[in-house]
Image (cartoon, coloured by chain):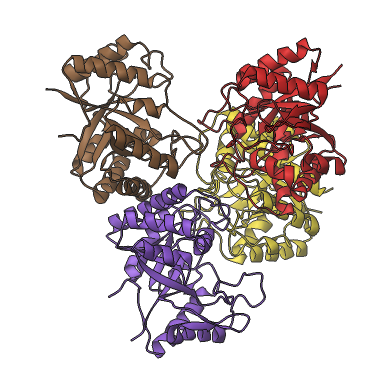
Chain colours: A red, B yellow, C brown, D purple
Amino acid sequence: MTQLDINADLGESYGAFQVGEDEQLMKVITSANVACGFHAGDYNVIADTIERAKSEGVAVGAHPGFPDLFGFGRREFNMSPKEIYNLITYQLGAIAGVCKVKDVELQHVKPHGALYNMAAKDYEMASSIAKAVRDFDSNLILFGLSNSELVRAGKDEGLKVAQEAFADRAYTSEGYLAPRSMEGSVLTSLEEIEKQVLSIVQNGCTTSLDGKQIPLEAQTICFHGDGDSAYHHAEHIKNVLQHHSVDVKKVGGS
Amino acid sequence: MTQLDINADLGESYGAFQVGEDEQLMKVITSANVACGFHAGDYNVIADTIERAKSEGVAVGAHPGFPDLFGFGRREFNMSPKEIYNLITYQLGAIAGVCKVKDVELQHVKPHGALYNMAAKDYEMASSIAKAVRDFDSNLILFGLSNSELVRAGKDEGLKVAQEAFADRAYTSEGYLAPRSMEGSVLTSLEEIEKQVLSIVQNGCTTSLDGKQIPLEAQTICFHGDGDSAYHHAEHIKNVLQHHSVDVKKVGGS
Amino acid sequence: MTQLDINADLGESYGAFQVGEDEQLMKVITSANVACGFHAGDYNVIADTIERAKSEGVAVGAHPGFPDLFGFGRREFNMSPKEIYNLITYQLGAIAGVCKVKDVELQHVKPHGALYNMAAKDYEMASSIAKAVRDFDSNLILFGLSNSELVRAGKDEGLKVAQEAFADRAYTSEGYLAPRSMEGSVLTSLEEIEKQVLSIVQNGCTTSLDGKQIPLEAQTICFHGDGDSAYHHAEHIKNVLQHHSVDVKKVGGS
Amino acid sequence: MTQLDINADLGESYGAFQVGEDEQLMKVITSANVACGFHAGDYNVIADTIERAKSEGVAVGAHPGFPDLFGFGRREFNMSPKEIYNLITYQLGAIAGVCKVKDVELQHVKPHGALYNMAAKDYEMASSIAKAVRDFDSNLILFGLSNSELVRAGKDEGLKVAQEAFADRAYTSEGYLAPRSMEGSVLTSLEEIEKQVLSIVQNGCTTSLDGKQIPLEAQTICFHGDGDSAYHHAEHIKNVLQHHSVDVKKVGGS
């Protein structure tokens, strides 16, 4: 029986600044990527988010980002491999510390925003991330864009990896996410989203924005936690998947 | 043979803002309190500081503070017990994470600045700190002002504690640090500092600013890392202590 | 004909963190209190907010707060009179600078959050605020809680002041806002809000939470920009006021 | 008689983080570039720095930077022309506000760090800066690297500009500062510095690192406020210049 994980980015509030529909999403997803306090999240939000994930039976992952609250981690920073390594280690430690006192297992690591996108294409940066994850805890699963340099680097460091696809984003023929500025880059109809997810799960491919069939292997599917419709999309797709006998469960599950 | 630990606050630089004389102090002290990124320190400084401590054979402790870079953690914040617990957990996790990848043992925890001073008098706050330390790692040693509520809370939670005295600060007759605004509150001559440290080590007491003998038990002595003269004071006192057959070693040492 | 100003706190977003229903509120209010970048707001949000106020014909005021993004300016800070003066001056300058390049007149100043509440009771702090406003531009109108120390200090420094009442908050018999922790402190029904506003405008008084009639003079009424219902409340009350022949216009209007 | 301005970057401390030797430099320079709170400086430091400049007779300029305390404004950010405009306006307003209450005239604007270097080569960015300065106050003098796009953009917007040269930095044959990574890029001997400054002032040129004579017009010379030797270099060069009958005075002086 085919197995698939559904993940979302959560815990992105900061002090009085409220972000996302965490409470609802937690009821649908199987893995939560928890912001670590650098691009979003704070020590209170992190603790509450991990507690909620625990009570909902959702697996917890660290979602480290660039130190850029103002830019929400979406701006590119040039950093040396050593700085990337330090950046990841600190944030992993912080999240793992909260998991420890809450008696929650840390399942995975998924870089956020610009860090994720840069590491998808830049092997050196990807390798620094993978090395930090490996040195911190070699049992952690590294989430990366399907077919990306991050996935490759994770494998090279001996990590378990989960290839990630996006339910509601169109792809270029090279297998990258089509930039948001391109028309049709964001899938908004449930039909389109459903079609893409089923094609990925059943056939290991999807159709690119310019009409080519591209290979797209995925063990985990992302729904964006800061969008209005993430919850409704995720809930619908989860039902569809289960109807098609896909076992929707956390990627680290046995 | 009497044993004493010498500690200092290190790793307090932030980006391009340089603080302290860490390189020199590391050659003299036996325990380093490493800022965790909230009142000072950043993920690069933390990594470098822990590496240096390792190479110098200095024990590493977490030095968590209020989330207040602008105020350097010296301003008082009112926080609920739950928030204090979250605050400590996050920072402990971050430092412990860096220690883990550097293969360094985390020895102790010493709250910083206003958090330290508030916890010295406020049992509820002290208790939240102690509970966070215990839940995170019950083998960590809690550093607190000698005879303070923090020491009491640490013992109540079953933690090992190290009572701390200040080499160069005068005390009130109640056993608190004399406020810096009082004349004579900061000891500047090596003779005074030497006399106070020897009295604490040999007799378990010192003389308060108003001339009373007060009990002052200490397993660790602090020299301020951000003062110009910390290194010279610490080096001199270390020699004096060794001359008096005091074994200067990290508090967690066997 | 009676005249009344309706104000709200706007421009409280920060980077990707979206706050408030500014677009709608701008269509109803007559004065906007624009966050200055310390407790909320950023240089882009400020520029956009002032532009929108200009195009909607809404008067612009500075809404300075404590330097506390994480706490949204709601936490108390102890600051010397000199620091309060510096705090206000910087933020006034920044907002006035943006007004200048947008060719918009700066009408008023209303302290935010804890700064507002502390200055309502602490004459020394209120006086520092008033002196900074006076030195920066003595034509600015100072908004303060009706009957507060801030109003008194403003008058003492020769400033025009606007006494402020809250449409949806109950008062204590001493004339302060009833703390949110008290039952009934927040008025949620349009009937209650309408009754309170009309009583203030027509009779210069309201009924306190414990049933006493208290004097409450107001030239401006506040609706909270970060609440969900601010827009609907403000729109309704504006209609009610106009129906009762109250001239709803900016406080600085001739 | 030839006239020359000597400027330095000041007011770069932040809270407890102390930077620079402002007190000494203020006794030698004729123009101070005051950090505006984004890459360095805070509202207290700014107020104190402007007061000190006033009492020493030093002209005050705004020294706006990227919003990057952690990177001290030295990291490059991609920003739209509109965002650059907003960034400059806010910071100009803040500094001008403090100047106003201190009764000090704001003389000039000099972008900081990466903003300065990017604007030296990027006309679009330079133009956004120049437009913000012009719209805020068209009497302000814009400081830019000699022969740079920033100087060109300032002139195109009708601003007075001051071309700036660096006393202790070697130049490439294209007229840019030689990167610090190149050997010989920083002049450390007083003889070299003296030779370069005199060549600029007397002949309007200097010799590049690879031995070519390049034109280098300058109305103001910069000494770096965060270096250890800035004060001694500036003091020496000032004496040398006066000995050579150069009138060392603020660039805006009549």
Indicate the quadrant where residue A205 lies: top right
Q: Residue at x 27, y 75 (%)?
A: D254
Nearest the viewer among C146 and A41 is A41
Quadrant of the rendered structure where residue C28 is? Answer: top left
Percent across and percent down for residue D33 are 42, 64
The N terminus of chain A lies in quadrant: top right
The quarter of the picture where residue A199 lies is top right
Residue A81, horizontal then vertical, whole percent: 74, 52
The structure residue drawn at horizontal position 55% and vertical position 87%, both measured from the top left corner, is D191
Question: For the view shown, which residue lies furthest in the bottom direction?
Answer: D244
- In the rendered structure, the answer to whether residue D104 lies left or right of residue D154 reads left
Residue A219's place in the image compared with D54, above or below, is: above
Q: Quadrant of the C terminus of chain A?
A: top right
Q: How many marks?
A: 0
Going 56% across and 34% down the picture, which residue do you hit?
A: B122
**What percent of the width, then of the height, locates residue D209?**
61, 80
* Position above or below: D138 against C152: below
C92 left or right of A116 in image: left
Residue sticking out furthest to the left = C1
Q: Nearer the viewer, residue D192 or A214?
A: A214
A141 displayed left or right of A232 = right
x and y percent of residue C166 in the render?
30, 23
Identify which residue, B179 or C169, lies in the foreground: C169
Res C65 visible: no
Say if D60 sits above or below D67 in the image: below
| Residue A159 seen in the figure | yes
Q: Is residue B51 left or right of residue A228?
A: right
Q: Nearer the viewer, residue D185 or C76?
A: D185
